[in-house]
Amino acid sequence: MTEPKTRTDSKIQLTPDQLEEFGTEMDAIRQRLVADLGEQDAAYIRNVVKRQQQFEVAGRALFYLPPAWPLAVAALSISKILENMEIGHNVMHGQYDWMGDPKLNSRMYDWDNVCPGEQWKYSHNYLHHTFTNILGKDRDIGYGVLRMDEGQKWHPYYLGNPVYAFLLMVFFEWGVAMHDLEVENLVKGTRKLEENKALHAGIMRKVRRQALKDYVLFPALTGPLFPLTLAGNAAANLVRNIWAFNIIFCGHFPAGVATFSEEECEDESRGHWYYRQLLGSANITGSKLFHLMSGNLSHQIEHHLFPDIPARRYPEIAGEVRTLCEKYGLDYNTGPLRTQLGSVARKIFRLALPSRRTSSTDSAPVVDDSLAA
Amino acid sequence: MTITERILGSRTLAALASPHGVDRYLEMVNPMWAATEVRARVVDIRRENPASDAAAVATLTLQPTSTWRGHRAGQYVQVGVETPERPGRRFTRCFSISSAESGPGERFTITVRAHDEGQVSKFLVHEAKVGQMLHLSQADGEFTLHESAATPTNNHLLFITGGSGITPAMSIVRTLLRDGYDGRANRKVTFLHFARSPEDQIFAAELAEIAAADNHVDVHLRYGDHRFSEFELRRLVPDFASTDTRACGPAGLIELVRAAYEDSDRLRVEFFKPPTTVSDDVEGEVSFAASGRQAANTGASLLEQAEALGLRPEFGCRMGICFSCVATKTEGTVRNVLTGEESSLPDDEIRVCVSAPVGSCTVNL
């Protein structure tokens, strides 16, 4: 394995003319995809929904057979993963809004997750996808909990980096739900508790609904098997949490992924926007099934270039994007899951400690002194 | 509401079936099973104007799912279909219901003219086959009567309709005749209708029957170049301005009727397309942020202005009903052409089909 690279120098490697040309080529891919959307994409997402529902029904039903408990958990986990990754995430991006089907519309859909879709769309579709990897603006860099970039100033709090990462993995959906509350900014004093009032109500409504389903109603329906079913539902949620965490952490945190400063991105051109999305993301190689189970977020680069195009299209344009990268001498960050995960894990441990050389960037730490006190 | 319906529509079951909802599961078993959403199967299609060389009109009889709550005469329903031209996409348009009032789960009819640009109407008239499933909304609309045929009154009713605008009025007259006593409407009804030609007259046979029968309903049909005039209306119904009137038809007809009624609050109208209100003091620039296009404000609706610039924004009913065309207005003031209401809020979600800019404005299209 190669020694982890330090943060890629994100100083622009392309001239403004090259950037514009690069943007035009990306726009051309986008136009072609948009023009081609139709029957196959509609049939695909409907089929995924159908399969996911079959796993869901199978999982819920198998809890009536105690010996089949592991199978039930497996089926329900698959259902929850498919729903969160290939259906929920992508539908809520508006990738299928063009179909005119209210059930697959980003305005209507709310996924099987304690994070309310309405809030997720704001912090993910808007904040994260607009300000991708801009330090100080993209709260997905470390999610306000972890130190995932050298540009985040070290603090003794970060000695717990691996522990926090582990906890975030186990409780991932809860982390996602609390993401919008910006707890770190509350601690820092830059956000007031009142600003969260409206969010609290939305989160609590969603939490109650999810808890009622997985921890009351379905267990109750299995009568005396209540505890087993409850444990099974919790296990399926845990499996989904671990899977989603791992896929998502490979999307932006492997070594070599670039971060950007706010100054670099002022009055950014369309070409630079594509450039930043490209260098700020990383892919995972794998089989067709793997891509499906990751909601095609294994093609994080293509997703960040075209976040509102149906994700099933990402593999088919990956070759072209890669060719463009070679043409412009840009890094296309990809590797198998174990490599990308290893790289992320090393970063989590390495950044728990202060950087060997003091970073010249003077970004504010994500967590303030007061938290460690 | 049967016990099955109550269970199927319950919040508990909805929670269990989340995130997709109960209907996605029921639909997999049988397309006519539904818990909350409404679908319908086409059970009959009849051409209304076979001898006409104008656009074809057909009446489709629909068997809705048990979730259909019924309709009041004069209401419309949204119909969603995927057409073979653009597979994978559902297009939703509004159509007036032409049959007499329906109860929950009961059959009803829509009468549709195949407009040249109307993908949905063309599909329904020319391509839909018996057995075709349609997505529906519940019935909606305020073009209805307070009157019930159950108690005869001396309240005079007047309908002024043009072309396919006859459908909601037909639903009302059919309901009065069906629910009245001895086949009568139980009040005086005057029906004034304008059609292109006798061949293009829909419901012709039934209208002739209604006209001939002793039922309190007077039918006056006008063809071709015969335009609506206040003079003629006054001859037919001298006190028209103090008579409860329902007018439905093309914008041109509606404008003439409105002028005749001046400020009378007895007139209620429905049009196919909202009138293009080009006000006198049109000024400013209209900018479409997402596409980077801008042009001088013409006073037309934002949807029309966007289309004039070559943009292809999403739209549905084009009359402010279906919310397909909702877009964010980031700056400026717009006027709702139906209500005259003005909005100056930044980041306001507006229906571009019925919003016209007042001065400069920016819309995210």
Image: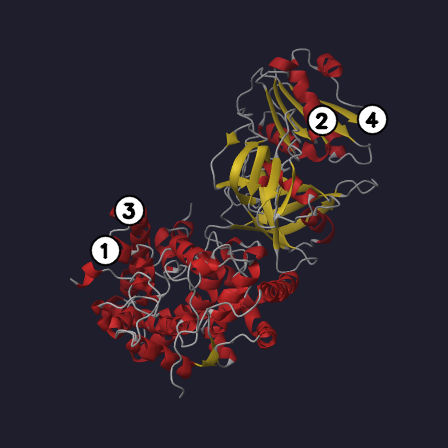
Using the image as rendered, state which of residue A292 and residue A66 is in the foreground.
A292
Which numbered tag is attached to residue B225?
4
Q: Residue at x 28, y 55 (%)?
A: A185
Q: Can residue B168 be seen?
A: yes
**Mark 4 Cα-neighbour bin, 10 Å: few <14, some 14–19, many ≥20:** few
| Residue named by callout 1 | A187
SS for callout 4: loop
**Mark 2 Cα-neighbour bin, 10 Å: few <14, some 14–19, many ≥20:** some
SS for callout 3: helix
Q: Amino acid at mark 2?
A: Leu
How many numbered discs sit on the rendered protein?
Answer: 4
Tell which subunit mark 4 falls on. Answer: B
Q: Residue at x 62, y 42 (%)?
A: B317
Name the front one of labels 4 and 3: 3
Q: Is residue B205 above or below residue A255?
A: above
Q: Amino acid at mark 1?
A: Val
Tell which subunit mark 2 falls on. Answer: B
Q: Amino acid at mark 4?
A: Asp
Q: Position of residue A140 (x, y in %)?
A: 37, 63
Name the front one of labels 2 and 1: 1
Left or right: A71 with respect to B260? left
Measure how far apart labels 4 and 1 are at the Cα level. Answer: 76 Å
